Image (tube, grey):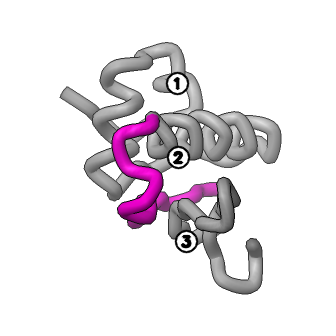
Amino acid sequence: NAERKQFELDIDGYTARIEYIIMAKKIFLTHTEVPAELEGKGIGSIIVKLTLEEIEKRGLKLIPLCPFTAKYITKHPEWKRILDEDVNLH
């Protein structure tokens, strides 16, 4: 949803979202939110994966400010390929 500057995933009438800011060819993921009704179902990981796929498709470089997204990339290091060169995840 470009108007709201967020990636959205609608499931069972609820919307999970990842907020972002785009500057130049960099995208900053600032916040991930999953409704309480969807928690514990892996929805957070699903929306992060779909978002990373879209970022790669658009040719943007990622700066993950959201701790959930950063943790996901740490667990799935293949996604480090889309990180901005100045990002260092532990």
Q: Nearer the viewer, residue 8 or 78?
A: 8
Q: x%, y% of residue 84? A: 49, 41
Residue at horizontal 66 percent and vertical 54 percent from the top: 11
Question: In the picture shown, does residue 20 fall above or below 75?
Answer: below
Q: Earlier in the sequence, mark 1 or mark 3?
A: 3
Q: x%, y% of residue 29? A: 47, 59
Question: In the picture shown, does residue 6 fall above or below 64?
Answer: below
Dot label at residue 1: none
**From the viewer's perspective, is 54 left or right of 4?**
right
Q: Earlier in the sequence, mark 3 or mark 2?
A: 3
**From the viewer's perspective, is 88 left or right of 8?**
left
Dot label at residue 62: 2
- Tally the numbered discs: 3
Q: Residue furthest left?
A: 90
The residue that mark 1 highlights is 79
Q: Amino acid at mark 3?
A: Ile
Q: Which residues are magenta?
A: 25-41
Q: Secondary structure at mark 2?
A: strand
Are the residues flagged by discs 1 and 2 in contact, CB closer than 8 Å? yes
Q: Nearer the viewer, residue 30 or 25?
A: 30
Residue 12 quadrant: bottom right
Q: x%, y% of residue 46? A: 56, 37
Q: Earlier in the sequence, mark 1 or mark 2?
A: 2
Question: In the picture shown, does residue 20 fall above or below 80?
Answer: below
Q: Quadrant of the N terminus?
A: bottom right
**From the viewer's perspective, is 22 left or right of 43?**
right
Q: x%, y% of residue 4? A: 66, 83
Which callout, 1 or 2, points to the residue nearer the camera? Answer: 1
Question: In the picture shown, does residue 5 fall above or below 25?
Answer: below
Q: Secondary structure at mark 3?
A: strand
Residue at horizontal 60 percent and vertical 66 percent from the top: 14
The residue that mark 3 highlights is 21
